[in-house]
Image (cartoon, helix red, strand yellow):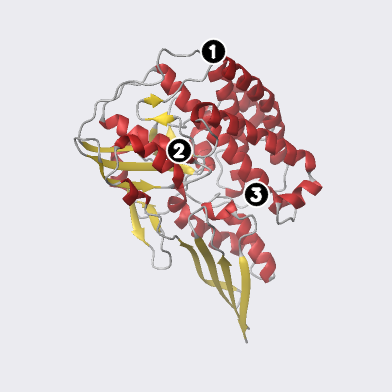
Amino acid sequence: MTERRVTIDVPSLARVEGEGALHLKIEQGTLQHLQFKIYEPPRFFEKFLEGRHYSEVPDIVARICGICPVAYQVSAVNALESLFEVELTPWIKQMRRLLYCGEWIQSHSLHIHLLALPDYFHETTVLGLAAKQPDAVKRGFFIQEAGNRLIKFLGGRSVHPIGLQVGGFHKAPSLAEAAELHRYIESALPEAIAMAEWVARLDMPDEQQSFTSVALTSPHYPLETGRLKSDRGLDIGVDDYETYFTESQCPHSTALWSLLKGENYLVGPLARLNLNVNGLPPFLDRLLAKLGNPFPSQNMFHSMLARAVEICFALHEASELLRNYKVPDTPSVPVRVKAGECCGWSEAPRGLLWHRYQVDAEGIIRAAKIVPPTSQNQARIEQDLAQSLQAFGLEHSDEALRLHSEKVIRNYDPCISCATHFLRFSAERSP
């Protein structure tokens, strides 16, 4: 028998968490060793926040990610507004939800069409996919534009928006702007439904695994608020997060790993749908019934369909919120600063995003902690890779193993997936 060692290197990406690698060691057809690594260069955002006024926090944390800045902003203001006991108006609450809908739509559509779908058509880029499926790609860009317009509507711009503040928004859009946006959203929803039906027909691996789903839950499908639950009995409020979840340094990765009572878990669209499928509007209940509703699902390859369903939900939700839009007397409410510690969370496109801040009596941030979705999914990704590669078959060629590994990792939409073809593969063999 021969010993087979496979090393996969993930190149550095400038706008995300950094470098990653996948190392496999296969001996006599058996997977003996696997390490999924993320080399995260110091970005210092938590330190950047120290000494800054609370009013600067939303604009600073928005720069953490170019794809999900709204999630960082909303988790931050949720925390600070809880400390300052801010009473938000119904308009502010509705518009926060509308803004979040925009982020889900643009992020999910980007992932499906630019990052994930090429894997299923044996292409390495969206350009190759467009040659085979031009209508699907055009539809994807049309849907993504709906998300971009929603973010710009309230954020002032679609990337790193600046419209959000502690206590509300800096500006309220006009009725004419709302009406124009509503027409676009209405036109995008049927396209999204068609896209979800198309995704459901793709040939996905039937690969069942055991994992814990963790997500916010609420009377309405959760975006910006809720209680944190799991499918194994967890049910906590935001202040209890650190009682159950711990971060630690994994020896083979510079990024922190998050565990729930010492075990890995899943956050993101599949986890959300697993826990909240009964909270979808009736038209999505009918759509899922038509598609042979697989949710709740223990197949990670259903993540793409989960994103497609959430796009449909977010477009419908946005349409409802815009339908009776009115310009408020004021887009924000007064804020009275006080010292203390506060926590906030929300459901980023990739999953739960938790913030904690210490604030002094002058409103200055003295300490900050941010736990992003990608770090929460790292341990689950490594376990998934080990199980999925063995189910796929270790006897496959190095190239086939590399491509399958990419597909598995991309299911989670981690920051490293911003490079469409990101795994560099080399094999070492010895007799």
Establish if 189 lies above or below 110. Answer: above
- Indicate the amino acid at tag 1: Asn
Residue 71 image label: 2
The x and y percentages for residue 114 are 66, 47
Determine crowd level at label 2: few under 14, some 14-19, many 20+ residues with C-alpha closer than 10 A.
many
Q: How far apart are marks 1 and 3 (CA)?
A: 36 Å
Q: Mark 1 points at which residue?
A: 324
Taking 404 as reference, is 77 left or right?
left
- Indicate the amino acid at tag 2: Ala
Label 3: which secondary element: helix
The x and y percentages for residue 310 are 58, 34
Label 1: which secondary element: loop
The earlier-in-sequence mark between 2 and 1 is 2
The x and y percentages for residue 156 are 51, 30
Give the camera-side residue of 6 and 229: 6
Residue 116 image label: 3
The x and y percentages for residue 196 are 68, 35
